[in-house]
């Protein structure tokens, strides 16, 4: 199965229903080549469990709710990264929504860790009223959470290696549209935009430099 496997195409997926609490799962990307990978959003009922077999690298972000990951409680904006060979069991202690990214890593991955959302280190971003906390830094890739205060504007920029955004709170905007919480946007290598927020502000998960550049 393939879904949104062409990284040269901009993709926007509306999962606002899951973010609002509707049960279910939304596939964002599925690739069979060059290596198997999938990105999904999943809404979990209280007490529901799921497992990860540990064959691939797993990234997980708690969008809302409270989960137990191998016995460790993780609330909203908590992030976990499990290297290949590390299996996991997730159990929702209350209704929750999670972002899951399973893939064969293109760079060596040996470290596994979890970051609690309540303990994240937020720092000043590149423009006023912008806060950022780094979740993972690779050789050419970066994963972070970014908090945008209301009425914040960022500089026009180009995505070398692409960009992936999941809106966690508020409404994220750029010249192409408005994206409420639960929206996933993938922009290709060398695309560009000028993002901003309105009166709601926004919190986003952002991954850069990780898409195909061919």
Image (tube, rainbow, N blue to C red):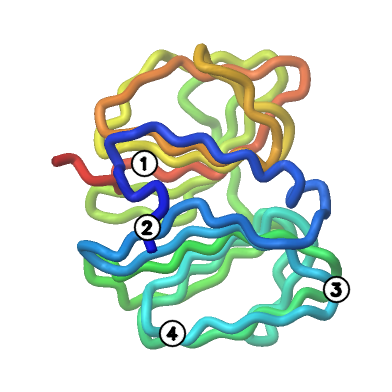
Q: Are marks 4 and 1 in contact (CB under 8 Å)?
A: no
2 left or right, relative to 43: left
Q: CA distance from mark 4 to mark 2?
A: 22 Å
Q: Which is more foreground, mark 2 or mark 3?
A: 2
Residue at image location 46% in from the left, 15% down from the top: 194
Instruction: Give the residue number, with chain letter if any, for mark 1.
Output: 208
- SS for tag 3? loop
Q: Are marks 2 and 3 in contact (CB under 8 Å)?
A: no
Instruction: Give the residue number, with chain letter if any, for mark 4.
Output: 54
- SS for tag 2? loop
The quarter of the rendered structure image containing the C terminus is top left
Residue at image location 40% in from the left, 14% down from the top: 156
- SS for tag 4? loop
> Residue 152, how many percent across, how many down?
62, 16
Q: Are marks 4 and 2 in contact (CB under 8 Å)?
A: no
Q: CA distance from mark 4 to mark 1?
A: 24 Å
Depicted 67 relative to depicted 209: above or below: below
Query: Of the numbered discs in the image, which one, if any, rests on residue 46?
Result: 3
């Amino acid at each position: 199965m393939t879904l949104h496997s062409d990284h040269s195409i901009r993709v926007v997926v509306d999962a606002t229903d899951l973010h609002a609490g509707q049960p279910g799962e939304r596939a964002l990307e599925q690739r069979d080549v060059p290596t198997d990978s999938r990105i999904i959003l999943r809404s979990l009922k209280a007490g529901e469990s799921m497992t990860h077999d540990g064959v691939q690298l797993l990234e997980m972000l708690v969008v809302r709710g409270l989960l137990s990951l191998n016995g460790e409680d993780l609330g909203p904006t908590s992030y976990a990264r499990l290297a290949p060979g590390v299996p996991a069991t997730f159990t929702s202690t209350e209704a929750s929504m999670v972002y899951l990214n399973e893939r064969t890593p293109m760079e060596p991955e040996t470290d596994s860790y979890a970051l609690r959302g309540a303990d994240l280190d937020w720092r000043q971003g590149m423009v006023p009223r912008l806060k950022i906390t780094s979740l993972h830094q690779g050789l050419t890739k970066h994963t972070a959470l970014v908090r945008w205060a209301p009425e914040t504007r960022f500089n026009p920029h180009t995505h070398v290696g692409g960009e992936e955004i999941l809106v966690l709170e508020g409404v994220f905007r750029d010249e192409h549209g408005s994206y409420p919480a639960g929206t996933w946007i993938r922009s290709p290598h060398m695309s560009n935009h000028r993002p901003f927020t309105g009166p709601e502000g926004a919190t986003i998960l952002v991954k850069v430099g990780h898409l195909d550049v061919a």
